[in-house]
Amino acid sequence: MPTTTDCPHCGRPLAPHVVDIFGRRVLVGYSACDCDGAVAERMRAEAREDAERKRRESQALNRRLAAAGVKPRYLHAEDPKAEGLARKVLAGKSLYLVGPVGAGKTHLACATARIVAARGIRVKVASMVEVLDAIKAGFGESDPMPGYQRAQVLVLDDLGKESPTDFALERLFALVDGRNALLLPTVVTTQYRPGRLIERLAKHGDEDTAVAIVSRLRQDSETVELSGRDRRLP
């Protein structure tokens, strides 16, 4: 068993580290050299390990977000406003992101959800159209509504795009009322301000339910207004 080796950078002899295992002396390594070359090599190795750790964490986060309903386009969403909004959501506050088509509402909501999910919070992302489709698909088998009602954070995307049928209104009320009762934050994106959303939801006459829905969405909620031209258009 060798008792010494030299630093490949400066040539200095390095003392061996030997341990006793069941009566046998086993070499387990050598002392680290403190020369500039050895220190720089260790720093490079630590940087590679750190980059690999972050890559694995990012991949794991992306898998969780995809399973939560985030579309591939928004898996890596980033926005300078997202960190501040995520802090509010983590503190239990809901968000009402409103703006015209293409203003970046979904992008900002998913960027916020990404930060929240990275803190270990269970996030679910869906449009009301997707929620309704899931409910219809589960008829006679399983009801997906509790999963949406009890998600730690729900991003309800593009609210108001669904057809405001009696069934849609009843299910939307059940969703927001359930989350409101449980004090769970909901991030809503919509192109409709509250008054216009009530008009949209009450299109077929059920204004009382429409008012109740928007009232619950706005309770403990912060409005974030986005503006600008459609980012999707050249």
Image (cartoon, helix red, strand yellow):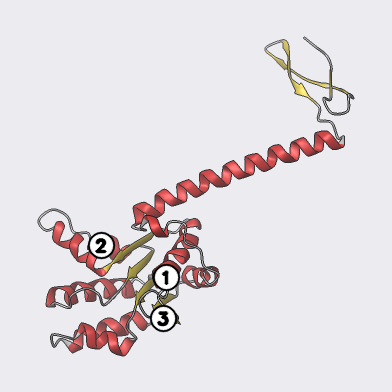
Give the residue type at disc 1: Pro
Q: Which residue is mark 1?
A: 234
Locate residue 27 relative to residue 100 in the image: left or right: right
Pointer 2 local density, CA inside 10 Å: few below 14, some 14–19, many at least 20: few
Q: Are marks 3 and 2 in contact (CB under 8 Å)?
A: no
Q: Quadrant of residue 197?
A: bottom left
Quadrant position of the N terminus in the picture = top right
Q: Residue at x 65, y 40 (%)?
A: 48
Q: CA distance from mark 3 to mark 2?
A: 21 Å
Residue beneath disc 2: 146
Q: Nearer the viewer, mark 1 or mark 3?
A: 1
Residue drawn at point x = 22 percent, y = 67 percent: 129
Report the residue that reaches farthest toward the left.
Answer: 140
Q: Amino acid at mark 3?
A: Asp
Q: Which mark is residue 220?
A: 3
Q: Quadrant of the C terminus?
A: bottom left
Count neighbours of disc 3 (C-alpha within 10 A) and say few if under 14, some if 14 to 19, many if 20 or more: some
196 vs 13: above or below: below
Q: Is residue 233 left or right of residue 169?
A: right
Residue 92 at x, y = what percent? Answer: 45, 72
In three-dimensional space, the C-alpha distance between marks 1 and 3, rounded to whole angstroms, equals 37 Å
| Percent position of residue 215, x then y | 31, 85
Mark 2 and mark 1: Cα distance apart in space:
41 Å
